[in-house]
Amino acid sequence: MSITRNQASGAYRRWQPPSFDGREEAPAPEATPQQDTPPAEDPAAPPRPQRPVAAPTLEPEAEIPPPYPGVQLPTVEDIERMHEQAREEGRKEGHAEGYAAGHKEGEAAGREQGHAAGYQDGKARIEAEARRFGELADNLDQALAKIDEEVAEELLGLAVAIARQMVQHTLATHPEAVAETVRAALMQLPQGHAHIRLHPDDLQLVQEHLGEQLAHSGHRLAEDDSLTRGGCRVESPGAQVDATMETRWRRVLEQLGREDATWEPER
């Protein structure tokens, strides 16, 4: 479609910039397009032949140039691909962030669980070692007590053996010591006229040392082969004193806690 000059001149008007002195000028009158006026026809004149009117020619529309020459706009496929790429990058970033956060939380939880498990394991080991040391201490105390008991028993046995040797030595070197045994037995009786039984070898010694004193008190001496040297047995009406070596030795050992030891005279 073409535009004539008259149509173009009527469609546009001149533009002027506004005045800077504050006064507005009246716009210029628009130009009225001039139209060609056909001359008046004479009614008597023959009619003019009509010229054929040519059909208007259509001119091809001009292509609008791109706003930015040299720049190719993305297609629908490109936009879809960019959206898919953005979604994939967002998914990867979210996965990486989630993995990092989960890894951090899992590491903290694992560290806490490991610390708790290690603490419980260490505590159990320490308690086991404490029980073991306690058992060792108890066993040590028991062992020491047993050693003390064995040592005490050995020391007591040694003391008994030494005492037996000393008594036997005294009887061998000082047989007259039996006289003191007789005198101590007589002092336990409430009254006189006692009957004193002695080993035959001790009888002579007692007569030598206490003969007159015993006769003056009304005591009598008698031999008894069943008695061991160093001891005697005194009998009186209503009383009896056992001063034999076996009895006196047993009483001494009972006071020391020994009940199984017996007097064994020297052969």
Image: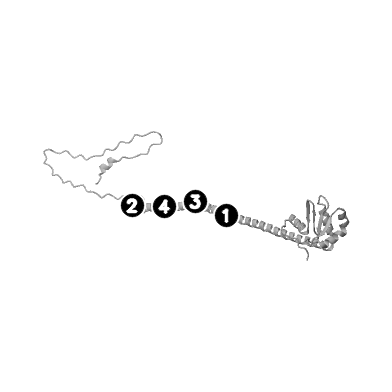
Pick the front one: 166 or 228: 228
Q: Is residue 73 above or below residue 22?
A: below
Residue 124 — which label? 1
Residue 11 — which label? none
Question: Marks 4 and 3, Cα distance to the nearest angstrom?
Answer: 20 Å
Q: Nearer the viewer, mark 2 or mark 4?
A: 4
Question: Marks 2 and 4, Cα distance to the nearest angstrom?
Answer: 22 Å
* Amino acid marked by disc 4: Arg
Residue 91 — which label? 4
Q: Secondary structure at mark 3?
A: helix
Q: Earlier in the sequence, mark 3 or mark 1?
A: 3
* Amino acid marked by disc 1: Ala
Q: Nearer the viewer, mark 4 or mark 3?
A: 3
Q: Nearer the viewer, mark 1 or mark 2?
A: 1
Query: What residue would you read off at disc 2?
Result: 76
Disc 3 and disc 1 in contact, CB within 8 angstroms: no
